[in-house]
Image (cartoon, helix red, strand yellow):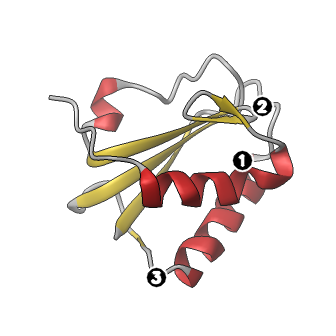
Amino acid sequence: MKVAIKYCGSCNPRLNLARLGQRLAALAEAEGMALASPEDNLDAIVILNGCRVACADRDEVRRLARRAVVVTECSVNGLEVAEADLAQAVARALRDAPCQRRV
C-alpha cells in the first residue's frame, strides 16, 4: 500500500505533528506500507491537522488518494483517540477503511 502524509501549516498545534509523523512512518514500514509523495498513485493519504480547524482536510488533498484518514488534534476520522494511541489508530484506519475517493 502506498501512503502519503499531508501536514497542516501548524499555526495552532495542539499536537506534535512531527513526532506523530515519525511514529506513522515507522509503523507504516513495519506493516509493509510504502511512504510515497503525493505525486505518486496513492492508495491512501493521512491528513494530519494539529487542531480542530482541520485546514489541511480539503477536497483537493483527499482526491490525491483512493482513501483518506484524517487526524484532527486527538481524533482519527472523527473518533476521539488518546494522543499516545493515534499512530496505531491511523494504521488501523488505513487497513480497515473502504475506498472513498472524492471526485
Tell me where residue 4 sits by quadrant. Answer: bottom left
Amino acid found under the numbered disc labelled 1: Leu
Q: Position of residue 90 (x, y in %)?
A: 59, 53
Label 1 Cα crowd, 10 Å radius (few <14 / some 14-19 / many 20+): some
Amino acid found under the numbered disc labelled 3: Gly
Name, please, the residue furthest toward the left: 103
Q: Nearer the viewer, mark 3 or mark 2?
A: 3
Q: What residue is at 40 percent from the left and 62 percent from the top? A: 3
Mark with earlier residue (3, 2): 2
Q: Position of residue 70 (x, y in %)?
A: 52, 37
Quadrant into which the C terminus falls: top left
Tell me where residue 51 sits by quadrant. Answer: top right
Query: What is the secondary structure assignment of the residue under circle 2?
Result: loop
Tell me the distance, in whole angstroms, between the alpha carbons under discs 3 and 1: 22 Å
Q: Position of residue 12 (x, y in %)?
A: 76, 24
Quadrant into which the N terminus falls: bottom left
Tell me the residue that label 2 is attached to.
Answer: 13
Q: Is residue 18 left or right of residue 99?
A: right
Above or below, 6 against 4 in this view is above
Mark with earlier residue (3, 1): 1
Tell me where residue 74 sits by quadrant. Answer: top right
Amino acid found under the numbered disc labelled 2: Pro
Q: Which mark is residue 32?
A: 3
Label 3 Cα crowd, 10 Å radius (few <14 / some 14-19 / many 20+): few
Above or below, 77 against 86 in this view is above
Between 75 and 62, the one nearer to me in the picture: 75
Q: Which mark is residue 17?
A: 1
Name, please, the residue furthest toward the top: 53
